[in-house]
Amino acid sequence: MSAEDHRDTPDEQEDDEDLQYFVRIGQTDLDGTKTVERSLTEMKGIGQRAARLVAETAEVDRTATFGRLDDEEIEGVVDVVENLDDHAPEWMVNRQKEFYTGETTHEVGSDLEEARRHDINRMKMIDSYRGVRHKRGQKVRGQRTKSTGRTEGTIGVNVEEIREEQEEEGDE
């Protein structure tokens, strides 16, 4: 039986009609054809462990297809993701004791990117070690730089250029 001979049964067609291909949480479109846990990990700020916590807290089967959930279940997942800092333990959130407010929050999506950008700009302004490394475009987290991270010029010997120079000197 080839793939062309396969015809959708009426049950499969009904399932496809019920399926939401995209589920929107905040400003992120998540894939509705994947499982709840796998789909949530596509969102910035949510990893596997946080996705599992979201599914447990929202009382949703983490292996269920995300696009086939009821609207109430999807709203429950959205609510838990938006208020994850209330449901997650303090060691699990990504913004512990924020610099300006001192609050512990969990940022997701574009809010996380914006917070990271503000942190890097603050480090640059106060000329901390990490800020100076960011300004120079060098490695920040202690990686080796003796042999990697070279961005300027060519490394090694350019044989063709040396031959051209020798020929010019020989002609003179």
Image (spheres, grey):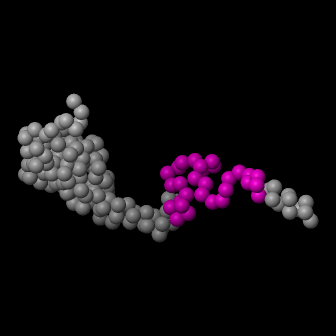
Q: Is residue 148 visible?
A: yes
Q: Hey, which residue is sitting farthest top in the picture?
A: 1
Establish if 143 lies above or below 120: above
Q: Is residue 79 magenta?
A: no
Count every numbered label the image shows and give the total. Answer: 0
Depth order, front residue of 65/139: 65
On the rendered image, what quadrant is the C terminus found in? bottom right
Q: Position of residue 166 (x, y in %)?
A: 85, 58
Depth order, front residue of 101/54: 54
Q: What span is colored magenta in the figure?
A: 133-161
Tell me if 51 is positioned left or right of 14 in this view.
Answer: right
Depth order, front residue of 71/16: 16
Q: Position of residue 40 (x, y in %)?
A: 24, 48
Tell me if 128 is positioned left or right of 71 in this view.
Answer: right
Q: Position of residue 159 (x, y in %)?
A: 76, 52
On the rendered image, what quadrant is the N terminus found in? top left
Residue ID at (10%, 49%): 17
Residue ID at (12%, 54%): 75
Residue ID at (19%, 35%): 5
Q: Main secondary structure of the magenta part?
A: loop
Q: Is residue 86 visible?
A: no
Q: Hey, which residue is sitting farthest bottom in the picture?
A: 125
Depth order, front residue of 133/20: 20
Q: Position of residue 95 (x, y in %)?
A: 31, 55
Q: Is residue 145 magenta?
A: yes
Residue ID at (18%, 54%): 23
